[in-house]
Image: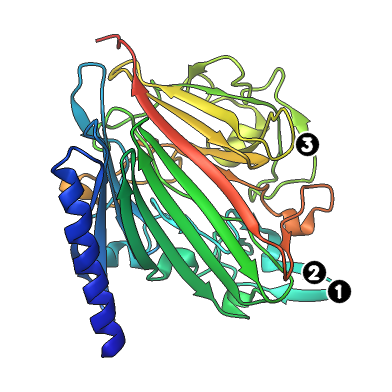
């Protein structure tokens, strides 16, 4: 009870302090209840706002981005990420929408990997494979939250512990994810993790975007440019073959901007395997680990733009091919096939089983640190 009282005091104290800044036209953070899970755990909703009026709503369940409101070319705001009004909908399964994904984002073949001569078995929650951390990954955790604001940014810091053996992964991992909404209309996501035993780790955020609005339907008109000369081909279960291939003369060449819909129904084998785009791109970096532009997206309808920067070697581009309309989200919107896209910065899928891929091993005494920036803006639209 003393601990709960302290947490409540911190929330109230922080709310008073941060809201007082809003009176001076500073960025601010507020907190309010979001609902209760069936197991009785309460979920809190944090709203980050910058001085331009952009807002991001995040819950402590899974660090999930519930909404993101940004302006179009005429200055009108709309929510451009999918989400749900009920925390249980996220917990029961919502395609990892908006969530912190870990311990290992994307797929690990056959739910197995060998590290230092020991084989580890994971939950097989994607056919025979493991995906996005297993049955109860980081998206199902209630993260501890602290929030603050400074003159140019609103900040939410989330921390969680993953115990040794959780979902089959070795080592106790302590993770921290910091969301910062600044006055450049950038949502910055900083990831940090340490371990007490050798393990593998690959964290990302799995937000689904539609720059016309979360309820606007098809994203096939969006134009996208991806800063990648290569990608990692997959087999018919979306497991990388181990090859790193050129995008030249394939539908996966986005080095010049083109509409998502232009080649999405190509008869190219890779497109057939993914039922559209669902591939990891090898991001061009001036130097390994340098923060670089990974992708730029533009909506001709709304004029909204989104640029993605990352220090990670890869980025998964997914076009919502397996959305079926059975997930009913905010405002009663059913999310149909290809009504949203994901740009998930990451290490390559199945890296623990692919010696030729950049390593995802984290050892005691090391720090896993990575940053991603989603920057929003607008330019004249076609409307």
Residue contact at pointers 2 and 1, CB within 8 angstroms: yes
The quarter in which the N terminus is drawn is bottom left
Foreground of the two, 117 or 149:
149
Within 10 Å of disc 1 (Cα), the crowding (few <14, some 14-19, many 20+) is few
| Residue carrying label 3 | 244
Mark sitting earlier along the chain (1/3): 1
Judged left or right of residue 379, residue 349 is: right
Residue hosting label 2: 114
Which is nearer the eye, 220 or 370?
Answer: 370
Q: Which mark is residue 117?
A: 1
Q: CA distance from mark 2 to mark 1?
A: 6 Å
* Relative side of 114 to 16, left or right: right
Residue at left offset 38%, top offset 20%: 221
Seen in the picture, residue 350 relative to 258 is either above or below; the reply is below
Q: What kind of element bears circle 1?
A: loop
Q: Residues within 10 Å of mark 2 (few under 14, many from 20)?
A: few
């Amino acid at each position: 009870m003393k601990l709960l009282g302290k947490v409540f005091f911190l929330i109230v104290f922080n709310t008073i302090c941060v809201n007082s800044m809003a009176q001076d036209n500073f960025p601010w953070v507020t907190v309010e209840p979001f609902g209760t899970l069936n197991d009785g755990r309460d979920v809190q909703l944090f709203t980050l706002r910058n001085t331009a009026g952009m807002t991001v709503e995040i819950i402590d369940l899974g660090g999930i981005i519930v909404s993101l409101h940004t302006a179009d070319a005429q200055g009108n705001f709309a929510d451009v990420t999918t989400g749900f009004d009920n925390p249980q909908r996220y917990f029961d399964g919502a395609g990892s929408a908006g969530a912190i994904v870990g311990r290992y984002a994307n797929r690990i073949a056959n739910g197995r990997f060998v590290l230092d001569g020991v084989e580890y078995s994971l939950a097989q929650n994607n056919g025979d494979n493991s995906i996005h951390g297993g049955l109860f990954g980081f998206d199902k955790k209630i993260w501890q939250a602290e929030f603050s604001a400074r003159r140019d940014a609103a900040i939410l810091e989330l921390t969680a512990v993953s115990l040794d053996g959780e979902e089959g992964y070795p080592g106790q991992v302590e993770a921290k994810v910091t969301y910062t909404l600044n006055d450049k209309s950038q949502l910055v996501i900083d990831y940090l993790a340490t371990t007490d035993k050798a393990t593998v780790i690959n964290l990302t955020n799995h937000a689904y975007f539609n720059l016309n609005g979360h309820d606007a339907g098809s994203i096939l008109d969006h134009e996208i440019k991806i800063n990648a000369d290569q990608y990692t081909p997959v087999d018919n279960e979306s497991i990388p073959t181990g090859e790193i291939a050129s995008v030249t003369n394939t539908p996966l060449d986005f080095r010049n901007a083109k509409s998502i819909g232009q080649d999405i129904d190509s008869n190219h084998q890779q497109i057939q395997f993914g039922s559209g785009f669902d591939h990891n791109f090898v991001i061009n970096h001036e130097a390994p680990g340098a923060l670089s532009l990974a992708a730029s997206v533009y909506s001709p309808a709304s004029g909204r733009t989104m640029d993605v920067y990352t220090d990670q070697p890869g980025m998964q581009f997914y076009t919502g091919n397996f959305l079926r309309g059975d997930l009913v989200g905010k405002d009663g919107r059913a999310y149909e096939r290809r009504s949203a896209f994901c740009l998930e910065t990451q290490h390559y899928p199945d890296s623990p089983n692919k010696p030729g891929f950049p390593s995802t091993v984290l050892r005691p005494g090391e720090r896993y640190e990575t940053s991603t920036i989603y920057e929003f803006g607008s330019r004249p639209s076609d409307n």
